[in-house]
Image (cartoon, rainbow, N blue to C red):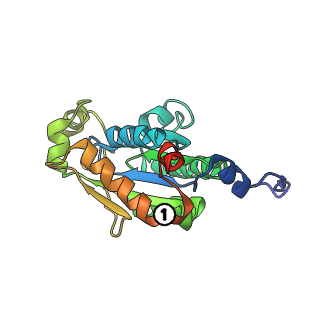
Amino acid sequence: MSSHVVQQLVDVDAATRARLKGQKPVAIWLTGLSASGKSTIANALEVALVERGRHTYLLDGDNVRMGLCRDLGFTDADREENIRRIAELGRLFVDAGLIVVTAFISPFRADRALARTIIGEDAFVEVFVDTPLDECERRDPKGLYGKARAGLIKNFTGIDSAYEAPLSPDIRLETLGRSLPEVVRQILGYLDERFAATDLTTSRSAANRE
């Protein structure tokens, strides 16, 4: 960073933005192998939060790679930079008062720890979508595992690039034999319990009826 860059102070702070939205801003960080179900779960979770009257934004790995991170490849260094950029973006969305749902492989523990540091411990929820590799390969909706096994894709997570599973995630989602509504309810239940005092997930319409 240039020594000439100085942070500009503003009068409207994060607490004011959160208060206007009536919610505790957080980043819900879904990590897991390709085809583990991250994007599907993230989308369903955002729908459930919006139905409860929450202000949200969903950041998906493929979508971000088509814009903000389109200059990055899949080397370890590029993956690290990809996650750093997403974490900085997530921090800005949290500062804006939003509940951010992210769906990224984010394969390395150090990078996820950095994301937690950038966004802030009290606003970061790590969700491990724990789907076994063989099940992810069986699903393979984009045909990526097959191409990686054939040597057509290099640095593919789970094949020739490591995935470091979270050791102590805030939420572990075991997906085998469970429905999408079940895993979404698990996340919402955790959020309800952890952020009960801050009205993160309570339905506004339900609250108004009481």
Identity of the residue furthest to the bottom in this view = 168
Q: Secondary structure at mark 1?
A: helix
- Left or right: 93 in relation to 153: right
Quadrant of the drawing holding the N terminus: bottom right
Is 115 in front, or is 93? Answer: 93
Q: Nearer the viewer, residue 194 or 85?
A: 194
Q: Residue at x 49, y 30 (%)?
A: 66
Amino acid type, residue under disc 1 in the picture? Ala
The residue that disc 1 covers is 196
For the point 16% across and 49% down, which residue is it? 176
At which x and y percent is residue 2?
A: 79, 54
Number of numbered discs overlaid on the protein picture: 1
**Which is more toward the observer, 126 or 52?**
52
User: Vertical placement of 120 versus 185: above or below?
Assistant: below
User: Would residue 28 be found to the left or right of residue 7 on screen?
Assistant: left
Instruction: Identify the residue shown where x is 43% and y is 59%.
Output: 192
